[in-house]
Amino acid sequence: MAAVSRQIGLRAKGLGLILGLALSLQPSALFAQARRIISIIPSTTEMLFAMGAGDRVIAIGTYDKYPPEAQKLPRVGALVDPNVEQILQMRPDLVVVYGTQTELERRLERANIPYYSYSHQGLPDIFSTMRSLGMRVGMAAQGEALAARLERQLAAIRARVANRPRPKTLLVMGREPGALRNIYASGGVGFLHDMLEAAGGTDALADIQRQSVDVSNEMVLARAPDVIIELRYTDEAINRADLDVWNRVSAVPAVKNHRVIVLTGDQFVVPGPRVADAVAKMAAAIHPEVGW
């Protein structure tokens, strides 16, 4: 009986040592280092390259435009049209997918291919994704370092605008060219709203709890923003005649005081490692008096 008890005690001690060892490991050690990664999401593709995992990425998504070194890689579709057969044929050991791509997830599960399911809402989600994605690919320290660096940069921007007036700002994501129709602007939730607040502005649509709001001319007049920021994604999309259409709402303070500002670049709509640069550009537009 004593021998049996001794065996049980030794087994329990052994299991305890194994459990203790597992808990003492760095989080990245709990995952195999992914070596053949497919990322079809612009933000996670940028994150992987920024944390030093770019040499492990074997394919990207249709709309992944950055960084330049990723552009030579094959493209395997995007949110609504992933090329599942091509993805399977490439034999990845990790696929980064949108959280809404349930059919793709099912196909990957049937093929025994691991995947990382991505989703985001606000600015903090960018940093939590960097940390969890870094952990998932076996680069927890690099993911943590990337997130922490960007958090410090954003804290510095917030500090510079902290004691200044916060002008009411309408952040326009898109509209019909040459017209004030089909205006889409940032509402009171989401990473664009959070970026605007971090840049020292007050969101003119903060009370509308949607990421994107369909805005009429009447709403622009009623909200009376002090600043209007239009986001454009290429320089070709800008011309003087197109911007002059805002004169149709000349009573709006932003128009009256010539504070309709165009910011160009896809970093404004890709919630990834360039987010601090995007917030800095917004802050310079809203607070030119700071001397950026």
Image (cartoon, rainbow, N blue to C red):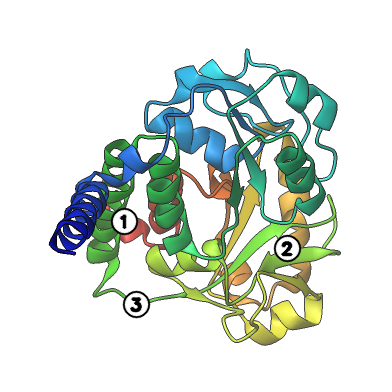
The residue singled out by tag 3 in the image is 165
- Dot 3 or dot 2, earlier in sequence: 3
Q: Residue at x 78, y 43 (%)?
A: 104
Q: Residue 35: percent from the left, percent from the top?
A: 49, 22
Label 3 Cα crowd, 10 Å radius (few <14 / some 14-19 / many 20+)? few
**How many C-alpha atoms fall within 10 Å of the one at disc 2: few (<14), some, or many (≥20)?**
some
Specify whether 184 is left or right of 133: right
Q: Residues within 10 Å of mark 1 (few under 14, many from 20)?
A: many
Per the model, the C-alpha gap separating discs 2 and 1 is 31 Å
Question: Mark 1 belongs to which amino acid?
Answer: Leu
The answer to whether marks 2 and 1 mark residues whose Cβ atoms lie closer than 8 Å is no
Query: The disc labelled 2 sits on which kind of residue?
Result: Trp
**Image point (75%, 64%), residue name:** 184
- Look at mark 2 in the image and give the residue it sits on: 246
Q: Residue 190: name its quadrant.
A: bottom right
In this orientation, does residue 22 appear? yes
Viewer-side residue, 271 vs 117:
117
Q: Which residue lies under the disc numbered 1? A: 154
Q: Given the image, on which type of amino acid does mark 3 rest?
A: Pro
Q: Compared to 165, does 132 lie above or below?
A: above
| Label annotation for residue 234 | none
Exactly how many numbered labels are in the figure?
Answer: 3
Element carrying mark 1: helix
Check the image and report above or below for 220 versus 155.
below
Q: Earlier in the sequence, mark 2 or mark 1?
A: 1
- Asked whether, in this view, residue 37 is left or right of residue 123, the answer is right
Q: Is residue 154 left or right of residue 180?
A: left
